[in-house]
Amino acid sequence: RGSNPLGDATSFAPWLLAGKALCVVLYAAAVARLAGWLPDGEFPYAPWIAAVFLIVHAIEVPIFWHRVTKYRGPLAVSIALTVLFGLLHLTPLRGGATEAT
């Protein structure tokens, strides 16, 4: 079996992909809300919820440092992915390193 450059099968588990997609939607809604691209009353709390997500995920970096460093790519990328996706990025790294999640 060859090495999969996109990571192991765990990194493509449907719940991981769905969770990451929801994070991206939340961050996009927050940016759109802050930029004034949404009508008044649409997603009023998106920036606050996104801020809480980013803070919690940033706290996860030192807590799960041993997993953050298992990522085969650059450490800065692993830190950025952890801040954006938290445990959704770190879960596939518990068993071994992956190159992309």
Image (cartoon, rainbow, N blue to C red):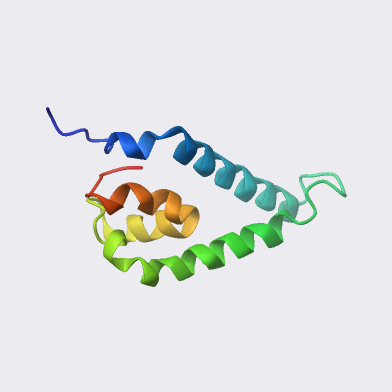
Name the spot of residue 17 as percent of width and height, x first: 47, 37
Left or right, 77 with respect to 17, comes to: left
Name the spot of residue 59 as percent of width and height, x first: 47, 70
Please report the residue visible at 80 percent of the width from the left and 54 percent of the height from the top: 44
State the quadrant of the C terminus: top left
Is 94 located above or below residue 2 in the figure?
A: below
Is 28 located above or below residue 52 in the figure?
A: above
State the quadrant of the N terminus: top left
Name the spot of residue 26 as percent of width and height, x first: 63, 48
Q: Farthest residue to the top: give it.
A: 1
Is 7 located above or below residue 30 in the figure?
A: above
Please report the residue visible at 31 percent of the width from the left and 42 percent of the height from the top: 100
Please report the residue visible at 62 percent of the width from the left and 42 percent of the height from the top: 25
Q: Which of 56 and 72 is in front in this view?
A: 56
Name the spot of residue 82 as percent of width and height, x first: 42, 57
Please report the residue visible at 13 percent of the width from the left and 29 percent of the height from the top: 2
